[in-house]
């Protein structure tokens, strides 16, 4: 059995030949997660992109054998850092307990393809 395991989910695929995440032992690290919908279309509104992005994040950590409780760090990139409210809305839905939330950092970045937000995360499983 390979030490490194590639993680894929059906509803979100990269254009390049890379997995959604990779796991070695109990450490899972995702690639970049965008807010495209299941059909691969990028919604125009950041609220929809955030909802899709968080849903993909949940599906990825579960495909890797964990839960959202195993996520320890999330990095978010925003086209416009003043648009954190939609990120926070989904953040509070996924992590409602203020005493049990991952670390998070938000950065501003120019993005292509209509993306207004993207993220990656690290999880420790088991």
Image: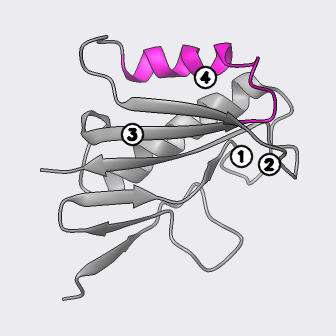
Residue beneath disc 3? 73
Say if mark 2 contacts mark 1, CB within 8 Å.
yes
Which of the 4 quarters of the picture holds residue 72? top left
User: In the rendered structure, which segment of residues is drawn in magenta?
Assistant: 78-95
3 vs 1, front mark: 3
Figure quadrant of the N terminus: bottom left
Is any part of residue 64 visible from this angle? no
Location of mark 4 (residue)? 87
Distance of label 4 from label 1 (alpha carbons): 15 Å
Q: Position of residue 107 (x, y in %)?
A: 66, 35
Here the colouring is: one colour
Q: Where is residue 98 in the image (x, y as percent from the top left)?
A: 31, 10
User: Which residue is most to the bottom?
Assistant: 1
The image shows residue 41, relative to residue 79, as above or below, that is below
Residue that appears at 32% across and 75% down: 5
Q: Is mark 3 on a helix, strand or loop?
A: strand
The numbered dot on residue 36 is: 1
Residue at screen point 31% across, 48% down: 123
Residue 108 versus residue 95 in the image, above or below: below
Q: Residue at x 37, y 20 (%)?
A: 95
- The numbered dot on residue 41 is 2
Give the mark, 2 or 1, whose residue is nearer the N terminus: 1
Q: Which of marks 2 and 3 is nearer the N terminus?
A: 2
Q: How many residues crowd around disc 2 within 10 Å: few (fewer than 14), some, or many (20 or more)?
A: few
């Amino acid at each position: 059995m390979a030490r490194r395991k590639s993680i894929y989910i059906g509803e979100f695929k990269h254009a390049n030949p890379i997995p959604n995440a990779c796991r070695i032992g109990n450490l899972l690290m995702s690639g970049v997660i965008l807010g495209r919908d299941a059909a691969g279309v990028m919604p125009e509104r950041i609220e929809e992109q955030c909802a899709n992005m968080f849903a993909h994040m949940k599906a990825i950590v579960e495909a890797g054998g964990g839960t959202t409780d195993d996520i320890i760090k999330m990095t978010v990139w925003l086209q416009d850092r003043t648009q954190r409210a939609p990120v926070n809305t989904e953040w509070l839905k996924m992590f409602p307990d203020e005493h049990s939330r991952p670390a998070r950092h938000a950065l501003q970045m120019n993005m292509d393809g209509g993306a207004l937000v993207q993220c990656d995360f690290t999880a420790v499983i088991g």
